[in-house]
Image (cartoon, helix red, strand yellow):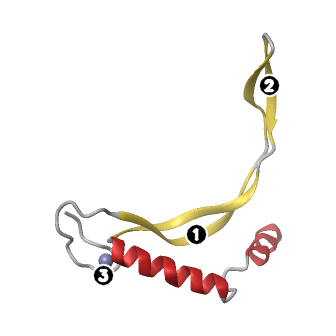
Amino acid sequence: MYRCQLCNVVQPPRTRAVKVTTESRPTEYPSRPKANRLRVGRKWKQFDDPGGAGFEIAKEATACPTCARAHEEKRAADEAAGLYDDDDLTTEAAAL
Ligand SMILES: [Zn+2]
């Protein structure tokens, strides 16, 4: 039993809760030298982690399956309409 954070209705017992991302933000991860250890033959070797850029979850909501499906469809429609242009965000993050 839980309250859906999107429709604010208490769900009956044994209903699956779905975590839905409501907000995300661009982020950068710094490179980490000698972060990974890997065995090559008999010897352990250290490898660098290159780091990089991506997106992380800023806000998450617990939703009922119906709301989660509706949210996912809306997000897919927005993405098709070009609301999330990843290239713009990464260049924006680089400018900051
Ligand atoms: Zn709901």
- Classify mark 1: helix, strand or loop: strand
Q: Is residue 83 left or right of residue 74?
A: right
The image shows residue 39 at horizontal and vertical percentages of: 75, 19
- Classify mark 2: helix, strand or loop: strand
Q: Residue reaching furthest left?
A: 13
The image shows residue 47 at horizontal and vertical percentages of: 81, 30
Q: Quadrant of residue 87?
A: bottom right
Mark 2 lies on residue:
46
Q: Residue reaching furthest bottom?
A: 81
The image shows residue 13 at horizontal and vertical percentages of: 17, 62
Looking at the image, tell me whether mark 1 or mark 2 is earlier in sequence order.
1
Q: Is mark 3 within 8 Å of ligand 1?
A: yes
> Cα distance, mark 2 to mark 3?
50 Å
The kind of residue on which mark 1 rests is Ser
The kind of residue on which mark 3 rests is Cys
Residue at x-position 32% and y-position 63%: 17
- Classify the position of the N terminus by image quarter: bottom left
Q: Is residue 76 left or right of residue 88?
A: left
- Classify mark 3: helix, strand or loop: loop
Mark drawn on residue 24: 1
The kind of residue on which mark 2 rests is Gln
- Classify the position of the C terminus by image quarter: bottom right
Looking at the image, tell me whether mark 2 or mark 3 is earlier in sequence order.
3
Mark 2: few, some, or many residues within 10 Å (few <14, many ≥20)?
Answer: some
> Cα distance, mark 1 to mark 2?
33 Å
Mark 3 lies on residue:
7
The image shows residue 94 at horizontal and vertical percentages of: 81, 67
Residue at x-position 58% and y-position 86%: 77
Mark toward the viewer: 1 or 3? 3
Location of residue 94 with respect to 31 vertically, above or below: below
Location of residue 49 with respect to 11 vertically, above or below: above
